[in-house]
Image (spheres, grey):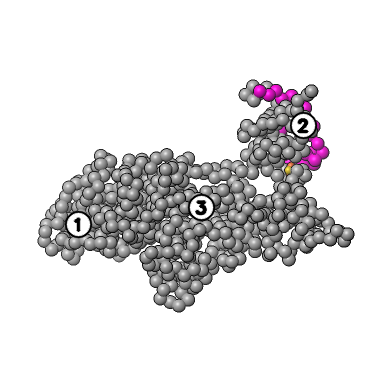
Amino acid sequence: MTTDPLVVFTPSGKRGRFAAGTPVLTAARQLGVDLDSVCGGRGICSRCQITPSYGEFPKHGVTVRDGALSAWNTVEERYKSKRGLKEGRRLGCQAQILGDVVIDVPPESQVHKQVVRKRAEAREIVLNPAITLHYVEVAEPDMHDPSGDVQRLQAALAAQWQIAAAQVDLALLPRLQPMLRKGGWKVTCALHHGAAGVPTVIELWPGLRDEPVYGLAVDLGSTTIAAHLCDLRSGAVVASSGLMNPQIRFGEDLMSRVSYAMMNPGGAAEMTAAVRDGMNTLFAQICAEAGIAATEILDAVFVCNPVMHHLFLGIDPFELGQAPFALATSEALNLTARALDLDLHPSARVYVLPCIAGHVGADAAAVALSEAPDKSEDLVLIVDVGTNAELLLGDKSGVMACSSPTGPAFEGAQISAGQRAAPGAIERVEIDPVSKEPRFRVIGCELWSDEDGFAAATAATGITGICGSGIIEAIAEMRLAGIVDGPGLIGSPEQTGTARCFADGRTHSYMLYDGSASGGPVIAITNPDIRAIQMAKAALYSGARLLMDKRGVDHVDRIVLAGAFGAHISPKHAMVLGMIPDAPLDKVTSAGNAAGTGARIALLNTEARRLIEQTVRAIHKVETAIEPRFQEHFVNASHIPNSVDPFPILRGVADLPEVTFNTGGDSGGRRRRGRRG
Ligand code: FES
């Protein structure tokens, strides 16, 4: 008795014996090997390319001889002459197994291929989109056996792809009959695989479609809306674009938008219309950039904070403005683009990530998906800094989340010379601890202010103000140089030994840049500026500290700063201020736009959607507003860096002078109570 030939697939290592004459594609399917196919083995899509190897393979215990696969056939020849095929490649649906063979599946033939991410520690993205393409040959109508076109399409999907009971989207029905006839009963279907498990045909093209299909990953922020257009077959980002959130005209921050909705009848609906309009403008922009039509976009994923989530969905955010901060729904949502007035494909699907809690939104869920604290071996604190900081603390034994009302000071608001990060804004500051003289850098120029050529290099932008990262560095450097004390008071010229400190009302200010001689601005750090940053950083730290209390720890192993602002903060300066807990500086990293990355992962992998839904359910939510210790932590954290927590690691790398500028008189004395600045 002869044994059937043995087939070993690489890189999966899957192996099995098959009767001689079995096509490689059939063997791959039976073994669960990831080998793509759109045409279902008809030799027209070329998705099933494989590379056979010949010779001795002791590792696999196989010797592959010439003739292990059937000879090159006319279908392959036709494909090669028309479209080209790399040397050594075969079509898996055409090549039949005749002898023992080792077969490599190249990455481009794998459906669930890995999408490369730049950061090594980040979660891998395996391609498994909600949209799949399937070529089918549908039976023609027959008067003797009457049946609908939809039913024959369903029968073809069941017989040729083992996809049973596929639904057909209502919006497609009017186009279904002409499309089937145009294609001569041969069509490519786009199937959407939703949460319910029943796939839906949402588009048809005549014949074999060999073009990409697209999806959008959208990060809907209070200030900006950012979108990535992705090719759902390769996982590649084809174009990225952003837009200011048009809701800004109703209020800069979230709470002012909630109040707008409360105070103006129809205000919430107005903001819903504005954000949806803005989305459509952004989609048109990104499609123009990629040279595609918006109707080619079949799937979209959205992440946003709870207020934006509600306004985008057309829900009045009233309840989010008051305790107990109840969400209308915290579940993930599977919707159609049509229901949200989005100008995409008429049957395009939309997935909105779940919210974690009333103040911790789908954006934090997306950060959790991207940074995977629930998979971390060590204890990680993830901080997404914005007008509302969202914090996650945990490891693989459990994750907790909270939000903290930092307010807009980190974005340069409430700061006397503050501005948004834009060319001309001071973004880096150093102060000499001996001379107390500052030097700085502005956005748009690589030179420091004391380097030759600085004046010429900044002539076009000017020096216009100080942005969030600049104010953090300035105050931290002032603390390191002994210009500001632990409670946050700026010393007098006599106390600090520098004329840059000057009396400014009842307190003192520090002159960073005086451009008044040439008609430019005066950029000084005032005591109210320091106070605003103290309030913001104390809120952030207290949130982190509260999570650490709940976890029963007094330090974390590493800290990840997420968000655009997080990418620009210097870890050392943030720690000198006491914004973030004490940790080795090399363990404080930036994750960039982790929420946007999370949206992209959910777009490219439907498994990830199920995963984050489970993870979010398991995240323990901590509501800072009702925690008595929050207030206590807040008061301690108002000190720079902290009046109670010792920060031993920081003190090992930075000298924090023990200066005190409160002389007990009226000039500096002030009491700080509570969270209001
Ligand atoms: S499966 Fe389409 S060419 Fe082989």
Q: Residue 551, how many percent across, how many down?
A: 34, 47
Q: Toward the viewer: 52 or 365?
A: 365
Sequence order check: which comes first, mark 1 or mark 3? Answer: 1
Q: Which residue is mark 3?
A: 613
Q: Is residue 106 visible?
A: yes
- The amino acid type of the residue labelled 1 equals Leu
Q: Toward the viewer: 629 or 533?
A: 629
**Mark 1 → mark 3, Cα distance in angstroms:** 47 Å
| Mark 3 CB near ligand 1 (8 Å cut) | no
Q: Which residue is mark 2?
A: 19
Which label lies toward us, 1 or 2?
2
**Mark 3 → mark 2, Cα distance in angstroms:** 43 Å
What label does residue 489 carry, if any?
A: 1
| Mark 1 CB near ligand 1 (8 Å cut) | no
Residue at image point 33% right, 49% down: 550
Q: Is residue 213 magenta?
A: no
Q: Residue 80, how many percent across, how many down?
A: 76, 40
